[in-house]
Image: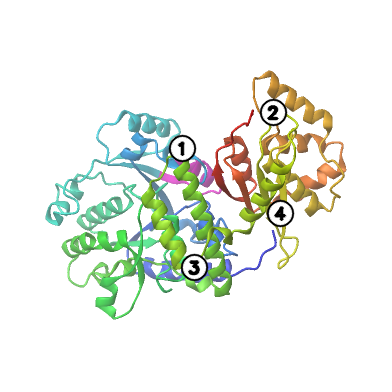
Amino acid sequence: MIRKKGFDTSRYLSAQIKRIMDRVNRFDKLYLEFGGKLRYDHHASRVLPGYALDTKVQMLKKLGNDIEIIHCISAKDIERRKIRRDFGLTYEDQILKDISDLKQLELDVSAVIISRYSGEQTSDKFRQRLANRGIRVITNSEIPDYHTDPDKVVSDEGYGKLNYVETTKKIVIITAPGPGSGKMSFAMGQIYHDRKLGITSNLAKFETFPIWNLSMNHPVNIAYEAATADIGDYNCVDPFHKAAYGIDATNYNRDVENFSIIKKIIEKITPVGDPLADIKSPTDLGVNMAKEGIVDDSVVRQASIDEIVRRYYQYHRDFVEGNVTHDTLERMDRIMHLVKAKPDHRVVAIQANKALEESSKKPKIKATEMHTGAAIEVYPTEDSPIILTGKRSRILTSESAALLNSVKYLAGIPDEIDVLSPIIIESIMKLKEQMGVVECSLDVKEVLDALAVSGVFNPNAAECIRVLPDLRGCDMHSTHLVGQGCERALKELGLIFTTDARIPIIDSS
């Protein structure tokens, strides 16, 4: 996809690495807590057009041989089988995927920490899965009174009871599949033990959002609130930073709330003159230089508003599926009002519903026929987006039809030319019918399979396959909920997908 950029990844990386190394060079060891997604950061790539999906990995590789990576996961999240929405994986499966992906990039994970462990069988099974892969696993129990008794926390009854993990590199990257995984308590526990061993170690937080030196109400920071509306995070001015320096810095509620205990802990473990004592605010803990990469603020603002609207649709879909409550929807309504956005700001949603309306006007061929619509916005040039729509038919779902129409347009193939072999289509539909599938229209995954086979002998199909990467980052909308196979394929293509979340119902009247 060709789209105007508002962010320069190279410029950002230069500033970010310098900031991290400035912090590293003041200590024997730096524990660098990574927020957000480590391997691919889809949110950042959407709100900062030009931000490479693998920017964090690029940064790790540029830091060279001085790093090792440790994953944290809460035993409570393993027990609940908590899911990462971007890939649809449980937290433990996401860690296994990350370990495998990082190993292919020659970035090894040195250990996995299971926090808040109290003998859960699910954690024991996960520990065995890791051990079978030769991965070091450490379990730590929950520290009682963590937020109320700093004296106990900074003692042999608190951090002293956490297992000390020996590390060999100067920079220890601490990452996790999601919030509440125990990264901070692990890092502070390590620093507690390090101090006893005479090692001068420090803590830093690497979180891309909110961007501390942009206004709290900048759309890119409000988009962070939208991304965390389900857990109730919100932006605020860092009161500790304001008190220490007289400067407004944007932070978020959990960081500010947690810093009260962190500040007390730092005071207890650091002697006079220790550089760690220079940390006077949660903003001081951070090393975020994202603002340095912004080259066109207007592009970033618009992309952030687009993301807020996308999140609006996502949460309404989550509500239909029972995954969020009315509170989340109310927070999103407030956020939408704050940026003066409305649901019809998403143009593909309007066009998908127009396709549905057109489809509904046509007479039914079968009594069980369903009507749905879908739309994709493609970018043949930077400033000239085109929207292609699709309607459900006997052969294709509306999502499949929109996909085929889009790749044919990008490949320059006239609409009247078929790119899928009728024999292959009928074969797939017959197989689905024999398997007892009620609705036999080909979904996106099946269309891609048919396209791959057709491409062997049909040059037009091969050309459609060639332009599939051009769909990455394009917006798509469907009027109805789609199946898992269909949605997984859309994610793999890199489409930014939303839905009105109508429940597909076969009308047999």
Asked whether, in this view, residue 173 is left or right of residue 165, the answer is right
Give the x, y percent position of residue 35. 41, 56
Give the x, y percent position of residue 225. 41, 60
Label of residue 470 in the image: 4
Q: Amino acid at mark 4?
A: Asp
The earlier-in-sequence mark between 4 and 1 is: 1
Identity of the residue drawn at 51% across and 57% down: 43
- Camera-side mark, 4 or 1: 4
Q: Is residue 316 above or below residue 265?
A: above
Label of residue 367 in the image: 2
CB under 8 Å between discs 4 and 1:
no
Say which residue label 3 marks.
340
Q: Amino acid at mark 2?
A: Ala
Q: Write the start and end of the magenta stretch as one range.
A: 93-110
The earlier-in-sequence mark between 3 and 2 is: 3
Q: Amino acid at mark 3?
A: Lys
- Camera-side mark, 2 or 1: 2
Asked whether, in this view, residue 178 is left or right of residue 246, the answer is right
In which quadrant of the rendered view does residue 470 lie? bottom right
- Camera-side mark, 2 or 4: 2
| Residue 198 in sight in this render | yes
CB under 8 Å between discs 2 and 1:
no
Say which residue label 1 marks.
93
